[in-house]
Image (cartoon, rainbow, N blue to C red):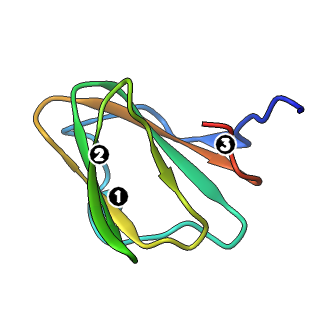
Amino acid sequence: MADIRPYRSTPVFDQDTLPAALRARHDTKAGVWGVVRVIEGELRLTYLDPPSEIVLTSDRPGLILPQQPHFVTPLGPMKMQVDFYDQPPEG
């Protein structure tokens, strides 16, 4: 299988620079998968459809499916980044 790489990544955000848009309900576009990667600390990822929550760490990234509504909440000091893919990422 070919090595699947993101076509775009956000800057690295911390608890102070995390944009309000990521803290509020939003979703990816059709055909776009997102992987939330925590570099330091913890981040809560809340999925709205279907409803669930997961705490992300450097060992536990979060997968966002195309058009899946969600938002994130820092759990104290943290650093994170989002990678975007045009096909399902390997992990």
Q: Are marks 2 and 1 in contact (CB under 8 Å)?
A: yes
Asked whether disc 2 touches disc 3, contact meaning CB atoms under 8 Å apart, the reply is: no
- Mark 2, residue position: 18
What residue would you read off at disc 3? 8
Q: Residue furthest left?
A: 76
Tell me which numbered mark, 1 or 3, is placed earlier along the sequence.
3
* Left or right placement of residue 87 versus residue 9 in this view: right
Q: Does dot 2 land on a helix, a strand or a loop?
A: loop
Q: Is residue 74 above or below residue 12?
A: below
Q: How many marks?
A: 3
Spot occupied by residue 21 in the image (x, y as percentages of width and height): 34, 63
The residue sitting at 36% across, 24% down in the picture is 58
Tell me the residue at 56%/66% (across/down). 28
- Secondary element under disc 1, as helix, strand or loop, is helix
Q: Write the residue at 38% across / 24% down.
A: 59
**Type of the residue with mark 3:** Arg
Q: Amino acid at mark 1?
A: Leu
- Report the side of 47 relative to 86 (left or right): left
Work out whether residue 57 or residue 8 is closer to the camera in this orientation and state it: 57
What residue is shown with label 1? 22
Query: Is 90 in front, or is 15?
Result: 90
Mark 1 and mark 3: span between their CA atoms? 16 Å
Q: Helix or strand or loop: what does disc 3 sit on?
A: strand
- Residue 85 lies, in percent from the top left, at 69, 48
Residue projecting furthest to the right? 2
Q: Earlier in the sequence, mark 2 or mark 3?
A: 3
Quadrant placement of the C terminus: top right
Residue 17 in which image quadrant: top left
